[in-house]
């Protein structure tokens, strides 16, 4: 990501603009433009009054990966209390799909469940008809959403169990 701006004679930043973008989805340009607006520089020396300087600021290293959260919960028809298997484990977004797939494999082989990918998001619904247990394995972008999910999942499971 690169930001170019002018430093005025009194040390303030003016005319800042992003000339290169950061990785898509990070929105570093907006944050960088807001930040440089607060930067102040030592005003020009007395022997060079009124001088403005054009500065190019470039972030050389890539940003850290975005973090997402993996949760895996089961509910049994007998008590409908959610059981947390993996509670909002943080995962680098770049690894999310592979971690999700390995967790699904654990449920299929370790718990003998049949899992099906849900449309539109990184989510699987799993079912063990014999033990009347369902599971949800999912990636969230927000930690609070992940934390709140077991209660919602229990309600969804109750409705699903009542239909079957």
Image (tube, grey):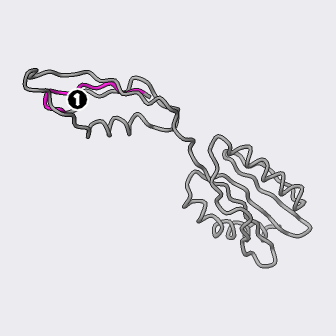
Residue drawn 32% across the image and 39% down it: 34
Where's residue 30, x and y in %? Answer: 38, 37
Q: Is residue 160 left or right of residue 64?
A: right
Q: Is residue 6 magenta?
A: yes
Vertical order, 31 against 20 (above or below): below
Rendering coords of residue 153 (x, y %):
68, 65
Q: To which residue does mark 1 refer?
A: 14
Q: Which residues are magenta?
A: 2-11
What residue is shown at x 82% (from left), y 53% (from top)? 115
Q: Residue at x 13, y 31 (%)?
A: 10
Q: Quadrant of residue 3?
A: top left
In front of the other: 17 or 50: 50
Looking at the picture, tell me which residue is in the foreground, 73 or 76: 73
Q: Nearer the viewer, residue 145 or 143?
A: 143
Query: Viewed as shown, does residue 55 lie left or right of 62?
Result: left
Query: Residue at position x 89%, y 55% from top?
Result: 109
Q: Position of residue 90 (x, y in %)?
A: 62, 54
Point out the image quarter for the C terminus.
bottom right
Q: 79 or 6: which is nearer to us?
A: 6
Predominant SS of the magenta segment: strand
Please determine whether, in this image, residue 69 is positioned above or below residue 47.
below
- Relative to 9, is 160 on the left or the right? right
Q: Secondary structure at mark 1?
A: strand
Which quarter shows the N terminus?
top left
Image coords of residue 48 (percent x, y):
10, 20
Residue 17, placed above or below residue 161? above
């Amino acid at each position: 990501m690169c930001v170019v701006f002018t430093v005025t004679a009194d040390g303030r930043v003016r005319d800042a603009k992003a000339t290169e973008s950061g990785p898509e989805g990070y929105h570093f340009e907006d944050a960088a433009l807001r930040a440089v607006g607060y930067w102040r520089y030592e005003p020009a020396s007395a022997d060079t009054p009124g001088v403005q300087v054009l500065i190019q600021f470039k972030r050389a290293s890539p940003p850290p990966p975005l973090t997402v959260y993996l949760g895996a919960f089961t509910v049994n028809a007998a008590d409908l209390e959610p059981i947390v298997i993996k509670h909002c484990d943080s995962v680098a977004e770049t690894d999310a799909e592979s971690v999700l797939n390995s967790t699904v494999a654990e449920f299929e082989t370790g718990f003998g469940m049949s899992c099906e990918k849900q449309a539109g998001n990184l989510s699987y619904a799993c079912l063990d008809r014999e033990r009347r247990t369902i599971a949800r394995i999912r990636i969230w972008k927000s930690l609070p959403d992940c934390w709140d999910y077991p209660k919602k999942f229990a309600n969804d499971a109750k409705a699903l169990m009542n239909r079957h």
